[in-house]
């Protein structure tokens, strides 16, 4: 084994260089991203032709419906306001935005207090868990009964479903503030205001981001359910409209609108904001490391790579050393 | 760098520090008295848990003493101090240059130029816009050293700054530190558990024992720069180590 190990070591890099370009393109994340919707459509069609149901719509029917809605070719106007798809989403977005801000503000205050005081933490802990455990459906039904059909119910539903995630993340953020850095700032007599701006807020930022993402995604779900049960307008309500009309393509079409819209917001707002805020983070991610290890064919090759990497690291250090000696 | 006029002075009187209460009470420092004056490099050595770091934390206001007093002056006024920590303690979300600017009294162009000068001094002049995560451990520690020097402190405190680094990097950083100390004429208080390091760098070595008592004050009267392989340096190191052995016997 040890005697022949040298041969594959020489051969393999050459072979992988040959089909490297094609293989790399096929393995690339952007190709995988493109591939997913196609695979999804294929499965959809397969299911459609297999079960042969008159209720389950084929993708082209749903996509055609969605296209008609977007281009306003369908003459339907929804709800008490007789609005189209854009109007319905605008109503939902406004409710989501207001509820989300309420969840962020209240959640941040409670989370800060819970992070700073063990007594406050004990006071709220079970309540937060209770809200977390409560199904959004119960909020929807209760709010519908209590407040009737209007804007207030859905807004409260968004705030309540999002709140626990904000509280928990902010609390963790406060508990994880870097004491070392605060001590450093103190020993250098850095003014309080600068410490808040350059130490406290940046250290909280990752947790605030997590709070926003979860609060938003969960609040979005809570909103849809509440609009289905306790509203006569909004994007969630339109799903119920098509359900009542017994049109599956409408239900699926609007569900897809929801998913696409959430993805759109995630890509345009959260990802960009995150990239800008966290550009200081080291580039290497866990996924890269795993893929790298899987990419090598033999244990020999893996060992060799690790060895190479640590050698490069060591040489990097050594260069610094000789730099100093010269200087 | 110009050598500052005037003399920094560190006065520690009857310093006592303990943590916890009742059965959990731990004495970190017991009745410590200390005078340090002028352009000297003083090392504090001792086993872990002997209160070395606590002393520095009290001197830099991070902790308050249980009783006793500390006073750091320069020409009669209150002196300012820089601190180099065991881990570099850089703000990971700020660039290297911004890390230096963070501790400046005001952020003028002049301050910026000064920060750049000290980055040059630790051979990192071209790394100002990098983030700490993009640097090696040794480079990060050099940024920490540049940060402490960049406020041009009267006194410099260092808490085992090289203990996390590999031997080669630590060695070259020690040389760098020595030449910076030599050029700038600061008063340095340097905590270490490495006797060789202490002998290589210092004029004076303070030996602490468990329980936070200052046991000995050894003068190392050898010319700089000192080579660890030099016979006189090796003899001095052996002398301090022997002292250590004696003290350990006393401690148990």
Image (cartoon, rainbow, N blue to C red):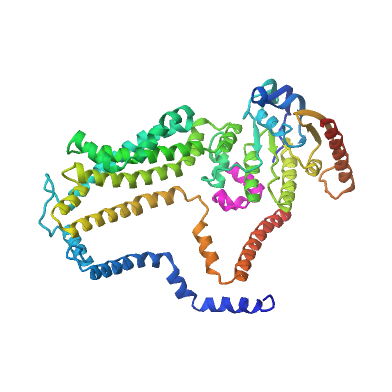
Q: Count how many numbered circles sit on residues in the image.
A: 0
A29, above or below B84, in the image: below
The chief SS type of the magenta part is helix
Residue drawn at (66%, 63%), measured in percent from left and top? A311
Quadrant of the rendered image containing residue A242: bottom left
Is residue A215 visible to the viewer in this orientation of the structure? Answer: yes
Horizontal relation, residue B69 to residue B240: left or right: left
Residue at the location (18% across, 50% down)?
A: A240
Q: Is residue B123 within the magenta segment?
A: yes
From the top left corner, tell me how far across and down residue A41 is, in percent: 29, 67
Q: Residue at x 30, y 52 (%)?
A: A262
> Does residue B187 appear in the picture of this structure?
no
Give the quadrant of the N terminus of chain A: bottom right
Extreme left residue here? A75
Queried whether the magenta region covers residue B101, the answer comes back as no
* Image vertical order of residue A164 relative to residue B69, above or below: below
Q: For this view, does A303 lie left or right of residue A48?
A: right
Residue A252 placement: quadrant: bottom left
The stretch in magenta equals B112-136
Q: Position of residue A121 (x, y in %)?
A: 45, 31
Q: Position of residue B43 (x, y in %)?
A: 77, 36
Question: In the picture provided, is B67 more to the left or to the right than B199?
Answer: left
């Amino acid at each position: 084994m040890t005697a022949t190990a040298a041969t594959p070591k020489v051969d393999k890099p050459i072979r992988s260089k040959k089909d490297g370009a094609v293989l790399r393109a096929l393995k690339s994340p952007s190709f995988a991203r493109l591939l997913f919707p196609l695979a999804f459509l294929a499965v959809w069609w397969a299911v459609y032709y297999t079960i042969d149901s008159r209720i389950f719509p084929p993708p082209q029917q749903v996509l055609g419906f969605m296209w008609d809605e977007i281009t306003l070719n369908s003459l339907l106007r929804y709800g008490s306001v007789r609005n189209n798809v854009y109007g319905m989403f605008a109503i939902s977005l406004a409710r989501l935005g207001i509820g989300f801000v309420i969840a962020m503000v209240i959640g941040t205050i409670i989370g800060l207090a819970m992070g700073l005081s063990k007594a406050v933490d004990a006071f709220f802990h079970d309540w937060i868990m209770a809200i977390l455990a409560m199904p959004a459906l119960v909020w929807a039904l209760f709010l519908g009964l209590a407040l009737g059909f209007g804007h207030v119910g859905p807004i409260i539903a968004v705030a309540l479903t999002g709140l626990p995630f904000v509280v928990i993340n902010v609390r963790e953020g406060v508990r994880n503030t870097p004491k070392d850095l605060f001590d450093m700032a103190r020993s250098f007599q850095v003014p309080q205001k600068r410490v808040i701006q350059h130490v406290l807020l940046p250290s909280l930022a990752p947790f605030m981001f997590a709070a926003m993402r979860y609060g938003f995604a969960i609040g979005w779900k809570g909103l849809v359910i509440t609009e289905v049960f306790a509203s006569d307008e909004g994007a969630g309500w339109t799903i119920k409209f098509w359900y009542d009309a017994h049109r599956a393509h409408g239900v699926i079409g609007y569900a897809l609108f929801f998913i696409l819209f959430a993805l759109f917001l995630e890509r345009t707002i959260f990802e960009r904001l995150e990239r800008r805020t966290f550009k200081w983070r080291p580039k290497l991610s866990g996924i890269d490391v795993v893929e790298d290890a899987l990419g090598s064919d033999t244990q020999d090759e893996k060992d060799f790579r690790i060895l190479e990497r640590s050698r490069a690291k060591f040489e990097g250090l050594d260069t610094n050393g000789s730099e100093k000696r010269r200087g | 760098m110009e050598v500052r006029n005037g003399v920094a002075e560190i006065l520690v009187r009857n310093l006592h520090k303990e943590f916890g209460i009742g059965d959990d009470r731990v004495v970190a420092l017991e009745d410590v008295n200390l005078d340090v004056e002028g352009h000297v490099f003083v090392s504090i050595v001792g086993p872990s848990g002997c209160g070395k770091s606590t002393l520095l934390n009290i001197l830099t206001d991070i902790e308050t003493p249980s009783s006793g007093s500390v006073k750091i002056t320069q020409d009669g006024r209150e002196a300012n101090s820089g601190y180099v920590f065991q881990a570099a303690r850089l703000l990971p979300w700020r660039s290297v240059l911004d890390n230096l600017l963070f501790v400046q009294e005001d952020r003028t162009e002049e301050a910026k130029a000064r920060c750049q000068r000290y980055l040059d001094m630790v051979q990192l002049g071209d790394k100002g816009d990098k983030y700490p995560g993009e640097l090696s451990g040794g480079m990060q520690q050099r940024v920490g050293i540049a940060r402490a020097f960049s406020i041009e402190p009267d006194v410099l405190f260092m808490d085992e700054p090289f203990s996390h680094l590999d031997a080669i990097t630590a060695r070259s950083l020690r040389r760098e530190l020595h030449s910076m100390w030599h050029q700038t004429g600061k008063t340095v208080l340097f905590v270490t558990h490495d006797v060789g390091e202490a002998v290589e760098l210092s004029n004076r070595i303070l030996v602490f024992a468990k329980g936070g008592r200052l046991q000995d004050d050894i003068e190392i009267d050898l010319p700089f720069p000192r080579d660890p392989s030099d016979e006189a340096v090796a003899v001095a190191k052996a002398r301090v180590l022997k002292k250590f052995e004696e003290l350990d016997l006393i401690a148990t």
